[in-house]
Amino acid sequence: MLIAVTGASGFCGSAVARTAAGLGLDVLCLGRSPGPTGRHRYWDATAGEPDLTGVDLVVHCAAAVGDPRPGSPGEAGQYAVNVTGTARLLRAAAGRPVVWVSSASVYDPRLPRTLVTEDHPTAGGHLNAYGRTKAAGERLALAAGAVVLRPRAVYGPGDPHLAPRLLERVRRGLLLLPGPDVLLSLTAVQNLADACLAALGTDAAGAAWPAGAYNIADALPHRRDAAVRAVLAAHGVRARIGHAPAPLARLAARTGRIPGLTPYAVDQLAHSVVLDTARARATGWHPRQELGSVPLAGPAR
């Protein structure tokens, strides 16, 4: 059984590739750079369809992430990869089972997210190009009959996104967070990788998931401040956490007074966002890693 993993040199894709190899699958890493295991076949998501000759299963992890300024080249780049690249991948897949890794950033932030099911609206309200393009890309994937997974704040060894962004906000031993402490769903990268393989029916359960969207997160939500303290400690950073009024943080983000602070970044930290994972659990999948058991610093394993 040959499984193609796009974006296999990236954080999530590499975890999927290693997990697939551990299950005894033949792994084909599709992307501009080789993955951590298996064979490599070059593919630029912005330049053409991938070569899926001989491939039986597909996990599409390739994505352009980040929080670019409106109208910037980064915003156009996200559309090219997350939407146009998805269309290219789906055409090449031509009926093969596909798992498409999306994001909880597709959910409309204007509505309460204290317990978010997969039926929460995804058609508008996004605070940056990442949310908009991931929502557009997953609409294509759902229309093509793919399984779409929606993790939130993926973390683990080798994390190139969440931890670095937190660490760079520490100033003189202080990390200011917007608003009071809140509950947040997080997703260990191994939990996401396990879900990708389970959705294709390649795990012990052996049954592929029905097409559609599924939230993927750790078993329980985390207190924001405690999770941030764990990240700081794992990286040997001694800093206390302070709380800035959320309206002040949103104003600073809108006016650009603090470099790197955006409305999306404030939203991700200031509001309780808890994913309902009942739909995924009903398939037999269960998250097996938690924040306290996962190394938060060091290279990916």
Image: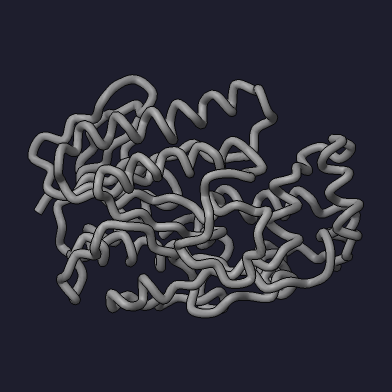
Which residue is located at x 85 percent, y 58 percent? 246
Front residue of 233/111: it is 111
Quadrant containing the N terminus is bottom left
Above or below residue 267? Residue 69 is: above
Which residue is located at x 40 percent, y 45 percent? 138
Which residue is located at x 37 percent, y 58 percent? 213
Looking at the image, residue 33 sits to the left or right of residue 245; the answer is left
Residue 257 at what x, y percent from top left?
89, 37
Corner quadrant of residue 260: top right
Residue 109 at what x, y percent from top left?
65, 54
Looking at the image, residue 61 sits to the left or right of residue 42; the answer is right
Front residue of 26/44: it is 44
Q: Is residue 159 visible in this depiction of the protein?
A: no
Above or below residue 107? Residue 296 is: below
Above or below residue 51? Residue 108 is: below
Looking at the image, residue 213 sits to the left or right of residue 109; the answer is left
Quadrant containing the C terminus is bottom left
Q: Is residue 152 visible in this depiction of the protein?
A: yes
Residue 179 at what x, y percent from top left?
84, 64
Residue 93 at what x, y percent from top left?
19, 38
Front residue of 82/140: it is 140
Q: How many numbered dots are placed on residues in this image?
A: 0
* Applied colour scheme: one colour
Which residue is located at x 19 percent, y 76 percent? 205
Looking at the image, residue 120 sits to the left or right of residue 35; the answer is right
